[in-house]
Amino acid sequence: MTIVHLPAGGVRQAGGCIEPVLLRGRVDHIDGATGELLHRYSTVHEPGGVLPVACKTRRATRCPPCAEVYSADTYQLIRAGLSGGKGVPGSVATHPCVFTTLTAPSFGPVHLSREKDGHLQRCRPRRRVQICSHGRRMSCGERHARDDDRLGEPLCPDCYDYTGSVLFNACAPELWRRFTITLRRTLARQAGLTNKALAAPLRVSFAKVAEYQRRGVVHFHAIIRLDGPTGPDTAPPAWATLGLLTAAIAQAADAVHLDTPAAPGLPARTLCWGREHDTRPITTTGELTDTRVAAYVAKYATKAAECTGTLDRRITPADQLAELPVSEHARRLIAERLRLSKLSGLEDLRLAAWAHMLGFRGHFSTKSRHYSTTFGALRAERAQHQRDRAATGSIWPTPEDDTTLVLAHWRFAGQGQPPITPPPAGAIRSGTPPLGPPEGGQP
Ligand SMILES: [Zn+2]
Ligand SMILES: [Zn+2]
Ligand SMILES: [Zn+2]
């Protein structure tokens, strides 16, 4: 039996992660026929007795190195679905495919940065001055630069529909789900097929990313592609054209709506997408190329609500709302979420738990099963690549045959840098990152 230890400076093991997940435990290789222990790796001899594993967060505010990896994987994954690669045939580039943006409706006028021909435009100019019932001007003649702190702030916070904004974020994932169902139905109707019959010749694949607008509401950017019955490796039927897809998206986006539950003092409301939706074809040579779209989605994949002036962690009962380091607009959004979370009838929206996300609890980037490859496949490919390149081998052996049992026992031992203690004398130095420990904490 061999016992091996990792080198000191375990941070390197976690690929530069600044908030690694610390694991305590061991991995045993056992001969399945005889029960003999062939090899044991244990963390007892590691610095601090723990093995640091990358946190794998997607959030750039928490761990830039891990977010960079996540962003690079997102780029590969999105691009493979547009022009092939990573197991997806290049012929996918000929399938009708668009980039569409579904926005939230208006909840009241906010300060905007607008540009025309490279010149900043006035925010909200009005010929005649309009004063709201709170005595505020409902116009703004300023030209706001893109980094102006007031962007996204309401012209009058007392007129602004904070309730609607909160409910929209909370219901946006369900609104998206209904949109995908309605889109399939619309395509079936246009093709003269029943919903069930549509699945035989056509599959609709999606990849979407959520983006927080400065006003604190989410909107979705989505890649929508038409495939044949088995996904990207089969061509869609000839009638499934780009024009048909574009028209169906517009119809579905206009038709979808959702009624929020009524609560004491809060009547039910109907939520729908904003009127502005934008759908453009993705091509390998045109204005909106596969690489541009992949870079755009990868950029948004590492951002979250904190970019709109809120927090990147959960708000606890111990937090004093008035003292949180957030913008006034974000504070009012959070306060409204906490208020609504106490109303009976709205429990299912879990508004308090997601208050720091301004109520949005969906996944940031999601894709349908047949879009392209998976994050897991990309990670496995990278691990294999590292194994192949490593001259010194891994910290535990690759089982020689399938009769070897690999038993791993891991316990979570905290998060952050491991305590700096020198490795015990006689530790064998090994150069490769650890393989196999469980995935780190995803948000
Ligand atoms: Zn990390
Ligand atoms: Zn303004
Ligand atoms: Zn007002």
Image: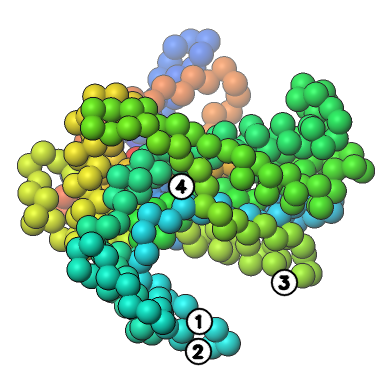
Provide the residue designation for mark 4: 364
Residue holding disc 2: 119
Contact (CB < 8 A) between labels 1 and 4? no
Residue underneath mark 3: 287
Q: CA distance from mark 4 to mark 2?
A: 33 Å
> Could you say whether the residue bearing mark 4 is in a helix, strand or loop?
loop
Label 1 sits on residue: 115
Q: Secondary structure at mark 3?
A: loop
Left or right of residue 43, residue 293 in this image: right
- Could you tell me if residue 69 is visible in this image? no
Q: Secondary structure at mark 1?
A: strand
Circles 1 and 2 in contact, beta carbons < 8 Å: yes
Asked if disc 1 is less than 8 Å from ligand 2, the answer is no
* Residue 381 position (above or below residue 132): above
Camera-nearest label, 2 or 3: 2
Mark 3 and mark 4: Cα distance apart in space: 26 Å
How many residues crowd mark 2 within 10 Å: few (<14), some (14–19), many (20+)? few
